[in-house]
Image: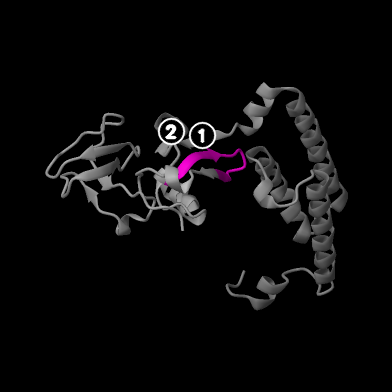
């Protein structure tokens, strides 16, 4: 074998006409995948649950290989999609009749913020990291947790946020990037501070060092109480 053989890299043993077959294979699998998503009742990928994402990934090999491997026939691939569609329909039928089975397959919504504070036990148990979570909050117009009455992490990964009225906003942990906040262990001024880890809000005095009674953290951030723009 010769390295960087242009003919081998371009078409290898296949004739030029095989490109037309590849085009047809791509069109075939495009139609099959599109019909699969239509039959499952999905309008967009962002609506897929974890269970449905697993199914799509399972189909990835069948959908990809058939588009350009000459020894992969079309009808078995169609049978793969049809079989998985039946499995999907049967699973959704079971989930519609068993709440426990639905929770096991898809999980259940999780309350992440309640009354301006993280549900710390839930986040710790589910191993939810705060970086991307903060980003989603910022994209929904949240500056600090004191603006939030309730935030729910949905089974499809989306975040539902319910805000407090302006007159009910309380001091809360900022969700700004860390470059834009001051993290302190020794309070430089007196006022309301939020635990940098679990979001507990506490009034602290200048020069005070405090241990969070909720999570035993030692770092604090000056709480904000601004209203939403």
On the question of residue 66 being in view, the answer is yes
Crowd band around label 2 with a 10 angstrom C-alpha radius: few (<14), some (14–19), many (20+):
some
**Front-most of residues 41 and 27:** 41
The quadrant of the rendering that contains the N terminus is bottom right
User: Which residue is depicted at the point 85% across and 43% down?
Assistant: 79
- Res 72 seen here: no
| Label 1 residue SS | strand
User: Quick one: label 1, few (<14), some, or many (20+) residues within 10 Å?
Assistant: some
Is 155 magenta? The answer is yes
**Label number found at residue 119:** 2
Q: Is residue 40 left or right of residue 164?
A: right
Residue visible at 85% across and 52% down in the picture: 74
Q: Which residue is the extreme one toward the left? A: 207
Front one among 196 and 12: 196
- What span is colored magenta in the figure? 147-160
**Within the magenta stretch, is there residue 222?**
no
Image x and y of residue 8, in percent: 68, 72
Q: Position of residue 78 (x, y in %)?
A: 85, 47
Q: Is residue 35 above or below residue 115?
A: below
Q: Residue furthest front?
A: 167
Point out the tag, 2 or 1, that comes first from the N-terminus: 1
Disc 1 designates what residue? 111
């Amino acid at each position: 074998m010769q390295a960087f053989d242009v003919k081998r890299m371009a078409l290898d043993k296949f004739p030029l006409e095989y490109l037309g077959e590849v085009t047809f294979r791509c069109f075939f699998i495009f139609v099959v995948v599109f019909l699969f998503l239509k039959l499952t009742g999905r309008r967009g990928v962002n609506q897929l649950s974890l269970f449905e994402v697993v199914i799509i990934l399972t189909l990835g090999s069948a959908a990809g290989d058939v588009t350009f491997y000459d020894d992969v026939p079309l009808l078995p691939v169609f049978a793969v999609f049809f079989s998985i569609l039946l499995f999907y329909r049967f699973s959704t039928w079971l989930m519609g009749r068993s709440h426990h089975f639905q929770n096991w397959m898809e999980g259940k919504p999780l309350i992440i913020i309640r009354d301006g504070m993280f549900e710390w036990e839930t986040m710790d148990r589910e191993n939810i990291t705060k970086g991307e979570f903060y980003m989603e909050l910022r994209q929904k117009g949240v500056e600090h947790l004191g603006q939030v009455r309730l935030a729910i992490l949905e089974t499809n990964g989306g975040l539902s946020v319910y805000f407090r009225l302006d007159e009910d906003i309380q001091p809360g942990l900022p969700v700004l990037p860390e470059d834009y906040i001051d993290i302190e262990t020794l309070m430089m001024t007196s006022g309301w501070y939020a635990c940098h880890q679990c979001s507990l809000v506490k009034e602290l005095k200048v020069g005070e060092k405090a241990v969070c009674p909720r999570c035993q953290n030692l770092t604090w951030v000056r709480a904000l109480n601004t209203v939403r723009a």
